[in-house]
């Protein structure tokens, strides 16, 4: 039994996956197996209709499957926004046809949510290896100006031809690669969370994401060049991540501190040159941040940690609430999220003592597991550059000052325990941020802009004179 077959036995939503060159004709076979006797309606945009949607429509017709008129979004500024949800909801409300989404992130999320709204399942034909959301539970949609995740099942079936994905714009595979390399520090974060008793490890889901992950990430230049084999490896890694999230009904297997940076910038409506920044590109910069902290943790004196000093310095919930309001300048949306998410993982002083005692006890073995898990900072940065993804915060419109401020907000952004929570609980945050953003740091505030020709400093390298 291969990994995909094994994964499909544990998934809650997706029951069929076909991935491989020349697999588009199997769309009709899958549709008939999953939705016998049903009509279909192809959902695409003008680009995905051209590269695969028209062909899928023909394949279904040739197989004798009845179809409604395809719904092709014509707006060139199409994105996963509520007005487009309302548009597709209107289409599906007028029919009982089963949607066949042909596209990547936006088309899939819109179809996923609207299918759920209209009481039916759907299938998807992927056209790019751009994110892990194809097979993930939930849809990421912007409503009332805020990006939110809405509960809805993943597709019942999926077909992906990597030769189509490899021919997609290079930035889409670059975004998918950045989303996949994020699973490396996310895995280390889960190890930490398990060690302190916050969120136990699910060995099946962890292995589903991590086994073979480094091989799938081994050739970023090949992915950038559109090598079909490398793009297929990338796509499979992303799809398996989605399956792991289905199996656990949580994004924990694929998401750690690096995704919290993306969540923050989503809420801040981050744009670069007037355009929204892709999920993968935000997560890629978050991966560098998380990796930098993990490297410093590996060098930290965890075994000598003065737990009682940390406990004495730990703030009460009332003090923490005041900090949240101050950090987010009493912005109602941020404060509401910060209070809820922080409350869900907050521990009192006795709880902190227990977490840090567990960490110290586990550290000798855990340290070596994390060391084996992560890819060094400089190598992560090099690979992001090779794949064509941003590798400096300025390349997504985040100044170094804003980047440093983001670290201070991350402990309050989500209830998930990560390496940043470890630094926060141990009292190392300011020291580590000074190393990263101070004189000689990898993101020294006021240092030359990216592309100046100066070499990057290793994130874990000590500040000269420190």
Image: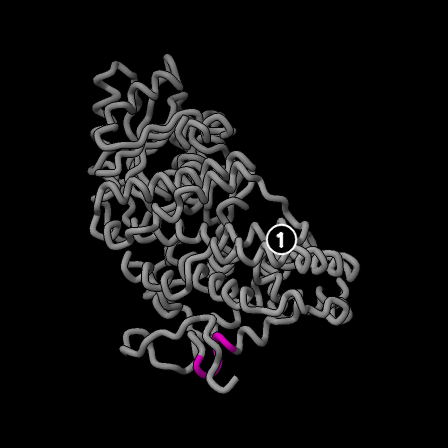
What residue range appears in magenta?
Answer: 435-440
Q: Position of residue 96 (x, y in %)?
A: 41, 21
Q: Residue at x 59, y 71 (%)?
A: 429
Q: Position of residue 408 (x, y in %)?
A: 57, 69
With respect to residue 14, does 245 lie above or below?
A: below
In the foreground, 410 or 150: 410
SS type, badge 1: loop
Residue indicated by mark 1:
415
The answer to whether residue 434 of the structure is visible from this angle is: yes
Q: Tell me if 466 is positioned left or right of 174 in this view.
A: right
In the foreground, 285 or 341: 285
Residue farthest along the bottom direction in this orientation:
465
Quadrant in which residue 326 is drawn: bottom right
Q: Position of residue 184 (x, y in %)?
A: 45, 52
Q: Position of residue 443 (x, y in %)?
A: 43, 75
With respect to residue 137, does 130 lie above or below?
A: below
Q: Judge whether residue 270 is colored magenta.
A: no
In the foreground, 184 or 115: 184
With respect to residue 381, does 5 lie above or below?
A: above
Q: Residue at x 49, y 60 (%)?
A: 261
The answer to whether residue 414 of the structure is visible from this angle is: no
Q: Residue at x 49, y 30 (%)?
A: 11
Badge 1 density bin: few <14, some 14–19, many ≥20, Cα 10 Å: some
Which quarter of the figure is the N terminus placed in? top left
Q: Judge whether residue 437 is colored magenta.
A: yes
Query: Is the image coloured rainbow, by chain, by secondary structure, or in one colour?
Result: one colour
Q: Residue at x 42, y 58 (%)?
A: 375
């Amino acid at each position: 039994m291969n990994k995909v077959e094994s994964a499909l036995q544990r998934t809650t939503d997706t029951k069929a996956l076909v991935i491989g060159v020349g697999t588009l004709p199997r769309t009709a076979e899958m549709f008939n197996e999953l939705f016998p006797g049903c009509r279909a309606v192809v959902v695409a945009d003008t680009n995905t209709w051209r590269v695969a949607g028209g062909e899928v429509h023909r394949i279904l017709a040739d197989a004798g499957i009845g179809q409604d008129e395809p719904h092709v979004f014509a707006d060139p500024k199409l994105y996963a926004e509520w007005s487009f949800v309302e548009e597709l909801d209107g289409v599906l409300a007028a029919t009982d046809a089963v949607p066949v989404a042909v596209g990547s992130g936006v088309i899939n999320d819109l179809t996923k949510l609207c299918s759920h709204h209209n009481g039916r399942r759907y299938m998807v034909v992927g056209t790019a290896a751009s994110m892990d959301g194809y097979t993930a539970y939930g849809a990421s949609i912007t409503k009332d100006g805020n990006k939110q995740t809405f509960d809805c099942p993943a597709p019942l079936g999926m077909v992906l031809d990597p030769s189509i994905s490899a021919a997609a714009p290079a930035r889409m595979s670059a975004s998918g690669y950045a989303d996949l390399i994020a699973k490396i520090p996310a895995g280390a974060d889960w190890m930490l969370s398990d060690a302190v008793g916050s969120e136990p490890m699910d060995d099946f889901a962890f292995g589903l994401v991590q086994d073979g992950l480094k091989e799938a990430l081994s050739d970023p230049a090949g992915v950038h060049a559109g090598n079909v084999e490398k793009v297929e490896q990338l796509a499979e890694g992303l799809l398996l991540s989605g399956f792991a999230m289905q199996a656990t009904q949580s994004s924990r297997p694929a998401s750690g501190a690096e995704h919290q940076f993306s969540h923050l910038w989503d809420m801040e409506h981050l744009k670069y040159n007037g355009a929204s920044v892709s999920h993968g590109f935000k997560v890629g910069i978050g991966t560098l941040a998380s990796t930098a902290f993990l490297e410093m943790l590996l060098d930290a004196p965890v075994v000598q940690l003065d737990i009682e000093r940390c406990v004495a310095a730990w703030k009460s919930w009332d003090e923490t609430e005041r900090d949240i309001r101050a950090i987010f300048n009493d912005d109602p949306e941020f404060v509401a999220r910060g209070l809820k998410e922080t409350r869900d993982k907050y521990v009192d002083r006795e709880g902190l003592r227990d977490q840090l005692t567990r960490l110290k006890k586990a550290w000798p073995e855990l340290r070596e597991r994390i060391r084996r898990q992560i890819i060094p900072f400089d190598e992560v940065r090099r690979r992001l550059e090779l794949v064509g993804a941003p590798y400096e915060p300025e390349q997504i419109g985040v100044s170094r000052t804003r980047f440093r401020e983001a670290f201070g907000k991350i402990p309050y952004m989500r209830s998930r325990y990560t390496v940043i929570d470890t630094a926060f609980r141990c009292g190392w945050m300011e020291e580590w941020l000074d190393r990263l953003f101070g004189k000689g740091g990898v993101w020294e505030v006021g240092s030359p802009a990216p592309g100046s020709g100066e070499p990057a400093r290793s994130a874990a390298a000590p500040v000269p004179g420190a």
